[in-house]
Image (cartoon, helix red, strand yellow):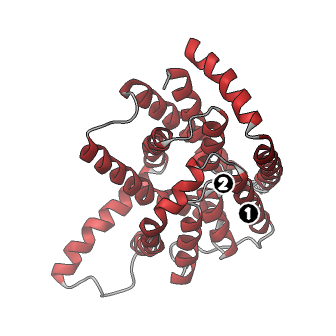
Amino acid sequence: MSYFSAIIQGLIQGFTEFLPVSSSGHLSLYQYFTGTSSEEALLFSVMLHFGTLAAVIIAFWPTVWQLLIEFLSIFADLFTGKLFKGYPKPYRRMLYFLMLSCVPLLVVPFVQDFIEGFSTDNSIIAEGCFFLITALLLTLADRAVKGIKTARSMTAQDSVAIGVAQVFATLPGISRSGSTISAGLLMGLDRSFAVSYSFILGLPAILAAGLLDVKDILETGELGVPVGPALVGMAVALVAGLLSIKLVKYLVSSDKFGIFAWYTLILGVLVLGIGISEHFTGNAIQNYLANTLFAVMVTV
C-alpha cells in the first residue's frame, strides 16, 4: 500500500466517520474501484478507526473525562454502599445509558463474517441499498420535532433505540453517526446532546473492534499493512476527523442536517445503478478504474 493511498483513505475515513454518510460505505467504494477489496484493505480500514477514535477523545475531552471519573467512582460507591442511594448525577446517568446502548453490540460477533462479506464481496449493490437506508433515516430525523431531552431526562428506551441503530450501522453504507444521531433526534433528544452522545457512544465500539484485530495480528504474527502508510493514514484520519466533528455540530445546530439525506440518496442511486451494471458487464468500470488508479498510486 502506497502513502498516497493511505492519505486518501485517511481523508475518507476521517471526514466520513462523523459526517452522516457512512465511512465504511465510502471506504468500501474506494477499495472496490481501486481493486483493493481484500483482508488487507479491511484491516487497514479498522486501523484508520484508531485515528478517528483519538479525534473523538480530543473533541469531547471534558465530557470524556467526566465520564471516566464517574466510571471509577462507581466502584468506590459500590464498596461504600452509596451506589444505589439518591438520584444519579447527569454524567452518571449518561454513563449508565451509554453502557446500555452498547448491549445490542453483543450480537455483532455472531454476524461479523456476514457483515464483513459486504466489504470484500467485489460488489457494491449492497452498499447502494444501505446508502438509501441512510438517506431515509436522515430524512426522518430532519423532519422530527426538536427534542429537549438531555442526560437528566433521557430514558432507557432512548438509549436502547440508539444502541440498536448502532448495530445496523456496522453494515457498509449505513452511517454510524447518521443512524445514532437520527435515532436520538427521533427519540426527542436535544440536538447538541444527540451529537455528543452519538460520538462518545462510538468510542467503545471502535476500541473493541480495534482490539479484536490487534489480537488477530498478534496470533498470526502478520501486520498485514506497512507500518509507515498505516501511521500516516491514522494521522490524516485524526485531523480530518476533528474538522468533520466541528462541521457536524454546526449543521445539526443550524437545522442543515438534511442536506446529507440528499447526498446519500443521490449516492445510493448512483452506486446501486453502477453495481447492477457491473454485474452484467463483468466489472468493466472497476477494472478500468483499478488499472488507471493503480498506475497513478505506484508513481506517487
Q: Residue at x 66, y 28 (%)?
A: 290
Q: Amino acid at mark 1?
A: Ile
Q: Nearer the viewer, residue 45 or 102?
A: 45
From where the camera sits, is residue 201 visible?
Answer: no
Residue neighbourhood size for the residue with mark 2, other residues' Cα within 10 Å, grouped as few (<14), some (14–19), many (≥20): many
Q: Amino acid at mark 2?
A: Gly
**Which residue in the protein does label 2 denote?**
173
Q: Nearer the viewer, residue 293 or 25?
A: 293
Disc number at residue 133?
Answer: 1
Q: Residue at x 70, y 59 (%)?
A: 130
Mark 1: secondary structure: helix
Looking at the image, residue 200 lies above or below residue 278: below
Looking at the image, residue 183 lies above or below residue 293: below
The answer to whether the residues at label 2 and label 1 have Cβ atoms under 8 Å apart is yes
Mark 2: secondary structure: loop
Q: Nearer the viewer, residue 203 or 255?
A: 203
Q: Residue at x 46, y 67 (%)?
A: 108
Return the x and y of residue 279 as percentages of the image width and height.
76, 47
Residue neighbourhood size for the residue with mark 1, other residues' Cα within 10 Å, grouped as few (<14), some (14–19), many (≥20): many
Q: Residue at x 63, y 17 (%)?
A: 295
Q: How many marks?
A: 2
Return the x and y of residue 33 as percentages of the image width and height.
67, 35
From where the camera sits, is residue 288 visible?
Answer: yes
